[in-house]
Image (spheres, rainbow, N blue to C red):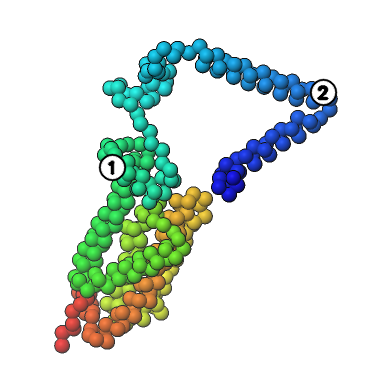
């Protein structure tokens, strides 16, 4: 039985250990303690036997002339399983752990094949998680669209929008790979990082493009802008990284994902974007120098010759 039913085997071993501990406790102490233990055990045995006798007497004298009806149930049990309209409550218990998303989805799908209007805690959790996930994904798209629009108004160029969003895209791609590598799933706690990472990560590209528009050189890291982006990113990583110290798994996951996402976007902004600007700058001038009235530079247009 130990190989076929390991859970039952552990329970039986635990029961045997509890009985041995009880016997040791009953045999400890002087004669007065032993008499007290014996009296307590005798009282327990008498109460147990009295309960068994009462149970058998109820079974012996029960009315078996007709089958059991709903009206014969105790009020507390009847009110729990019988509705005001007379409908009966049918409870279905899952075989798997429905706290896991994939097993929860399979359980709810199987139930809805029988009754589309089924309800209960697993169904409510499934719908709540789905609604929350879709809401954060939608918020991420809205934030991305708003950021792209503001960057376009700032630089007046679609090329600038693409270049400013490249560090976010590459950083998010790296973040996804790292989450898969360290087996960190996307859950209700860390999915809220999507709009946050986009909003924080895009600032790196905007600052670097602004400095590049002024000096027309991609050597950003050796200048004050690169150092400012680095220090700003490190402070944000330290702030969100402090959540890793939390014992709550959700907050811990939020801190890990947020700190890693900011770090990947910062690294992409300080390495990939300057290198891309240098490569494209050799092909043609990308940025007009600021005009005399200190207006914003534009990207994606050639200098007038």
Q: Residues within 10 Å of mark 2 (few under 14, many from 20)?
A: few
Give the mark toward the camera: 1 or 2. 1
Q: Residue furthest left?
A: 305
Residue assigned mark 1: 113
Q: Residues within 10 Å of mark 1 (few under 14, many from 20)?
A: few
Residue at point 45%, 55% (across, down): 253
| Residue 228, numbered label | none
- Residue in front for this viewpoint, 94 or 240: 94
Q: Quadrant of the rendered structure where residue 81 is?
A: top left
| Left or right of 28 in this view: 207 | left
Q: Residue furthest front?
A: 65
- Residue in front for this viewpoint, 69 or 303: 69
Residue assigned mark 2: 32
Q: Position of residue 225 (x, y in %)?
A: 37, 73
**Is 23 located above or below residue 166 in the figure?**
above
Q: Position of residue 213 (x, y in %)?
A: 27, 77
Q: Position of residue 203 (x, y in %)?
A: 33, 66
Q: Quadrant of the rendered structure where residue 68 is?
A: top left
Residue at point 62%, 39% (across, down): 12
Q: Earlier in the sequence, mark 1 or mark 2?
A: 2
Residue at point 34%, 58% (across, down): 194
- Mark 1–mark 2 distance (CA, rounded to whole Å): 66 Å
Q: Is residue 139 visible?
A: no
Residue at point 59%, 16% (across, down): 53
Kind of element beneath mark 2: helix
- Quarter of the image with the C terminus in it: bottom left
- Quarter of the image with the N terminus in it: top right
Kind of element beneath mark 1: helix
Q: Quadrant of the rendered structure where residue 209 is?
A: bottom left
């Amino acid at each position: 039985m130990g190989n076929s039913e390991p859970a039952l085997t552990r329970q039986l071993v635990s029961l045997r250990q509890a009985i041995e501990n009880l016997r040791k406790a009953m045999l400890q102490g002087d004669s007065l303690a032993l008499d007290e233990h014996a009296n307590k055990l005798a009282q327990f045995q008498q109460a147990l036997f009295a309960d068994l006798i009462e149970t058998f007497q109820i079974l012996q004298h029960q009315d078996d002339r007709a089958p059991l009806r709903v009206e014969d149930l105790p009020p507390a049990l009847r009110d729990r399983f019988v509705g005001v309209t007379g409908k009966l409550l049918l409870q279905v218990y899952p075989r798997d752990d429905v706290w896991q998303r994939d097993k929860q989805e399979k359980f709810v799908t199987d139930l809805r094949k029988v009754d589309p209007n089924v309800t209960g805690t697993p169904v409510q959790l499934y719908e709540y998680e789905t609604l929350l996930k879709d809401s954060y994904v939608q918020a991420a798209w809205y934030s991305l669209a708003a950021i792209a629009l503001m960057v376009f108004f700032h630089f007046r160029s679609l090329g600038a929008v693409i270049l400013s969003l490249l560090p976010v895209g590459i950083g998010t791609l790296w973040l996804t790979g790292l989450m898969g590598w360290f087996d960190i799933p996307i859950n209700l706690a860390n999915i809220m990082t999507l709009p946050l990472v986009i909003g924080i990560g895009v600032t790196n590209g905007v600052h670097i493009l602004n400095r590049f528009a002024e000096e027309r050189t991609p050597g950003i890291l050796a200048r004050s802008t690169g150092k400012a982006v680095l220090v700003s990113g490190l402070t944000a990583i330290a702030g969100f990284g402090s959540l890793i110290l939390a014992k709550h798994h959700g907050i811990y996951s939020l801190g890990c994902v947020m700190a890693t996402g900011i770090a990947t976007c910062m690294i992409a902004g300080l390495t990939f974007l300057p290198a891309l600007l240098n490569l494209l700058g050799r092909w043609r001038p990308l940025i007009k120098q600021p005009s005399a009235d200190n207006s914003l530079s534009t990207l994606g247009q050639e200098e007038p010759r």
